[in-house]
Amino acid sequence: METHDRRENLSDEELKKKAYSIAFKLKRAGMELAEIIKRLEQEGVPKDIANGVIMNIGRDLVRKEKDKQRDALEAALVRLGIGIAGALVCVIVFPDQHILPIGSIIGGIVSAVMAKLKYDS
């Protein structure tokens, strides 16, 4: 009853702010989304507001993961490009050397893979 009385005194906007605050704290603590909904309902947040908050948090997590993957791809492509540019410089500066350009390209590929692994972990 006490949580119900507190809920009546809060506007919808205040309830949403409270729900987001609680939900982000619980998500950072490692709680699953279904458990967060239950906790929000225990705190007096209506089910429709709790579901909306969880949907927005889920979208935010998906967007952050896509941004992370895009950053990893961009870093890998930049490193690969540097390797190819290094190979072109080696071909121009040392035309008789075939190992240097190949090594530069392989180095770019390895660096790109390492960048991808770094961002994935």
Image (cartoon, grey):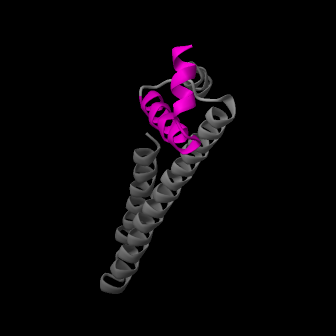
Q: Which residue is drawn at 48% across and 35% down?
A: 18
Q: Is residue 117 left or right of residue 32?
A: left
Foreground pick, 27 / 113: 27
Foreground pick, 66 / 117: 66
Would you say residue 43 is visible in this rendering? no
Q: In which quarter of the image is residue 47?
A: top right
Q: Position of residue 35 (x, y in %)?
A: 58, 21
Q: In which quarter of the image is residue 78?
A: bottom left
What secondary structure is the stretch in magenta mostly built from?
Answer: helix
| Residue 8 included in the magenta stretch of the image | yes
Q: Name, please, the residue furthest toward the right.
A: 48
Q: Which residue is drawn at 39% across and 68% down?
A: 83
Q: Which residue is drawn at 42% across and 31% down?
A: 25
Residue 65 versus residue 98 in the image, above or below: above
Give the position of the C terminus as an image quadrant: top left
Q: Is residue 93 left or right of residue 31?
A: left
Give the position of the N terminus as an image quadrant: top right
Q: What stretch is highlighted in magenta?
A: 1-28
| Residue 101 included in the magenta stretch of the image | no
Residue 13 versus residue 47 in the image, above or below: below
Q: Name, please, the residue furthest toward the left.
A: 93
Q: Where is residue 55 in the image (x, y as percent from the top left)?
A: 64, 40
Q: Is residue 10 left or right of residue 112?
A: right
Q: In this view, does 55 lie to the left or right of 104?
A: right
How many numbered circles does the render carry?
0
Q: Position of residue 5 (x, y in %)?
A: 54, 22
Would you say residue 12 is visible in this rendering? yes
Q: Residue at x 40, y 46 (%)?
A: 118
Q: Name, please, the residue furthest toward the top.
A: 1
Q: Where is residue 86 in the image (x, y as percent from the top left)?
A: 35, 74
